[in-house]
């Protein structure tokens, strides 16, 4: 494993497993399988309705909590709730999370941020993150909040490498965590000839080449899967190194086009979106 050094001194694994769109049963089994395979970074969220399942998966694995870098997110409907962090910890069956994100940049994000700051002071959260936040709001958090953020989580992949955002984050030693690291499973991306050629060169799959590209770009990746073989394959990316020439070829795929484009109306709707039951 390789690690990202956060600006508060924490070390974060560069690759982990995500639980987006996994049912509680699948999340529980995937988390247990991943941990048993050596994975130590887990990403979940209360919006995924599988935090309780994530907690069960951790217990099932037998891996000590202190050996796991556990990440979750608060949804806008609970930003202003005094018990939001405690409720999350209860679902996860833990006393703390290593990194906690605000999931969406709704109007009440500042209240949510202050709630997380309080949790940091109480030892319930180790690092603060902003998910899907535009650069100007990340800057506001840096300038106005008592505790500076450590990580942003945004869409990033070879079609959309977040070049300008990465330059901005570097000024503050902030990390980038990529969702849709494989382009949301887009075959046109995964099957690009450059990845097929590099796969043959290194004896790796196209997906492994893309995930290795992320790590060398400094991105933390959290591909999700419920297949134990795929889970293991997703982390078999630390025994080879792409060359500068390889990275330059991949850079040619950049078309600065995301798959997800949030409108102000979509973002505003998140503040009213009620969550499903966490089972």
Image (cartoon, rainbow, N blue to C red):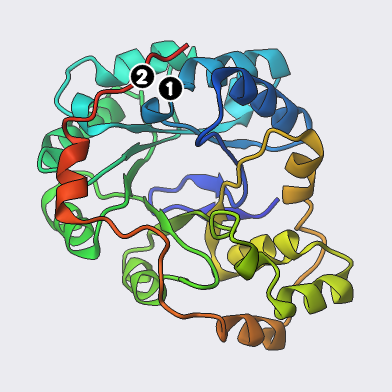
For the question of whether residue 235 can be seen, the reply is no
Residue designated by label 1? 49
SS label for mark 1: loop
**Pointer 1 or 2: first along the chain:** 1
Depth check: give the residue in front, 123 or 87.
87
| Above or below, 30 relative to 241 | above
Q: Residue 271 carries which label?
A: none
| Above or below, 163 relative to 4 | below
Other residues around mark 2 within 10 Å, as few (<14) / some (14–19) / many (≥20): few
Q: How far apart are marks 1 and 2 (CA)?
A: 6 Å
Residue 123: horizontal and vertical position, in percent?
35, 24
Q: Which residue is drawn at 72% across and 66% down?
A: 209
Contact between marks 1 and 2 (CB within 8 A): the answer is yes
Depth check: give the residue in front, 89 or 262.
262
Q: Is residue 197 left or right of residue 164?
A: right
Residue 105: horizontal and vertical position, in percent?
21, 47
Residue designated by label 2? 276
Q: Residue at x 82, y 39 (%)?
A: 229
């Amino acid at each position: 494993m390789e690690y990202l050094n956060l600006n508060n001194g924490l070390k974060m694994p560069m690759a982990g497993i995500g639980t987006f769109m996994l049912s509680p049963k699948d999340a529980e089994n995937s988390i247990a399988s991943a941990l048993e395979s050596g994975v130590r970074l887990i990403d979940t969220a209360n919006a995924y309705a599988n935090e309780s399942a994530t907690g069960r998966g951790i217990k099932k694995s037998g891996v000590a909590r202190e050996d796991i870098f556990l990440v979750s997110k608060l949804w806008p409907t609970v930003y202003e709730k005094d018990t939001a962090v405690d409720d999350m910890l209860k679902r996860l069956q833990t006393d703390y999370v290593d990194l906690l994100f605000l999931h969406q940049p709704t109007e009440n994000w500042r209240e949510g941020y202050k709630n997380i700051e309080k949790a940091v002071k109480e030892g319930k959260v180790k690092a603060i993150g902003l998910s899907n936040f535009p650069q100007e709001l990340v800057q506001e958090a840096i300038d106005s909040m008592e505790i500076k953020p450590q990580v942003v989580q945004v869409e990033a992949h070879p079609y959309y490498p977040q070049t300008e955002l990465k330059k901005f984050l570097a000024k503050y030693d902030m990390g980038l965590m990529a969702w849709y690291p494989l382009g949301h499973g887009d075959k046109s991306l995964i099957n690009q000839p450059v990845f097929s050629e590099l796969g043959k060169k290194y004896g790796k799959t196209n997906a492994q080449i893309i995930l290795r590209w992320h790590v060398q770009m400094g991105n933390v990746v959290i591909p999700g899967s419920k297949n134990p073989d795929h889970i293991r394959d997703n982390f078999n990316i630390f025994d080879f190194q792409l060359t500068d020439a390889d990275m330059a070829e991949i850079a040619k795929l950049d078309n600065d086009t995301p798959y997800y484009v949030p409108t102000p109306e979509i973002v505003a709707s998140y503040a009213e979106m009620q969550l499903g039951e966490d089972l």
